[in-house]
Image (spheres, coloured by chain):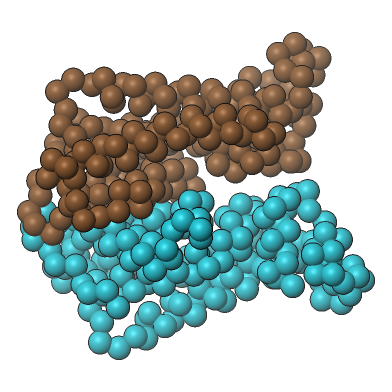
Chain colours: A brown, B cyan
Amino acid sequence: MLDAAAKVFHERGYADASVQDVADELGILKGSLYHYIDTKEDLLFRLLEGTHDDVNRILEEVRAHPGLDVLERLRLYVQRQVEYNLANVERVAVFYHDLDRLGEKRRRDILARRKAHESFVAGLISEAQRTGAANPALDVQVLSRCVFATIIWTYKWFRPDRDGPEHVAHSCADFALRGLIGQTAPVALPPVS
Amino acid sequence: MLDAAAKVFHERGYADASVQDVADELGILKGSLYHYIDTKEDLLFRLLEGTHDDVNRILEEVRAHPGLDVLERLRLYVQRQVEYNLANVERVAVFYHDLDRLGEKRRRDILARRKAHESFVAGLISEAQRTGAANPALDVQVLSRCVFATIIWTYKWFRPDRDGPEHVAHSCADFALRGLIGQTAPVALPPVS
């Protein structure tokens, strides 16, 4: 149901799409959809919640992964998030395109969940700066936002018929790591995992 | 007129906004707006064209700027584009949010103009790789897209009451340069201009 909603919202635009369109995409009656939701906004909220459930699992996997130093942990986070985005372009597009269409309470709820990711990445960058793995002179908040830019914008340019997802995920992780390390002295990037 | 259109399309969403809303924002009669445009899509197209006129001026300024080496030219491009985005958040938001709402011919027209920017940046990165200023082992297309991610995504996170535009533009340019240079050997970043 959420995949169908993502497809329909992405193709028609959330504002122009209807619950009927989503039912048609699923090949079921609109009434059947109304067993699960009351409004089109419910569908959007479920979709964004489901996407956050997915990316939270990535965050927890990366947080709990044993034996990584701070740069390796950052790299794994970027790589896994890019891989997720490339495999779920429609969901990610709707997430960033239509978040503001939610009612205020639900919008805040989703933004709070996103905040956990921002804090995680900013925390790792701060730790890298404290331990000398990254240049402590740089602005952690701006670095963190540039790292998310690298991760998120992939949904706009990735073409499955042209780009290899694994290559893109590794290349983006490398790009972000070099950017956030911010040293001009020799730095060996952590190995690809 | 275009600033008012940007504000209205950004706040209400293009699909939900009307020519009447734009006229109200300007404090004029809808009939007066129809001297300049025939449809809401005309307004959107004019807005995206105007935005491209602006960023093309930046491209030409950077291309013609005398006495820059290739990395300095790349840095200047990123810095100027970020500065433009931070000063025109609503226009840039509408550009990336509603480009697909244009009719097919107009959409292709705008995409072709965007292509010129992608070619410019990819060309400079290739030149940097050829001249040894950047690591030639890296994928120019992915690097170029990550550079644009760094530039473009600022419109989503910049808060004028919190972030200094000059600091953000310099920090983003540094981040992108480190990412695209892609060397682990000592590299002195070009000076800020």
Camera-nearest residue between B13 and B35: B13
Q: Position of residue A97 (x, y in %)?
A: 60, 43
Q: Residue at x 54, y 76 (%)?
A: B54
Q: Quadrant of residue A54?
A: top left
Q: Give the number of callouts.
A: 0
Decide if residue A155 is on the left or right side of residue A140: right
Residue B14 shows in this picture: yes
Q: Write the residue at 19% across / 67% down.
A: B189
| Camera-nearest residue between A66 and B36 | A66
Q: Quadrant of the N terminus of chain B?
A: bottom right
Left or right of residue B170, residue B160 in this image: right
Residue B25 versus residue A184: which sits nearer the camera? B25
Q: List the single residue furthest toward the front.
A: B161
Give the residue drawn at x 28%, y 24%.
Answer: A63
Q: Is residue A161 visible?
A: no
Relative to B123, A111 lies left or right: right
Give the percent coordinates (x, y) of residue A42: 69, 24
B174 in relation to B46, above or below? above
Residue A183: quadrant of the picture: bottom left
Query: Which quarter of the figure is the C terminus of chain B placed in?
Result: bottom left
Is residue A130 depicted above or below A44 in this figure? below
**Residue drawn 43% across the image and 43% down it:** A152
Q: Residue furthest bottom?
A: B66
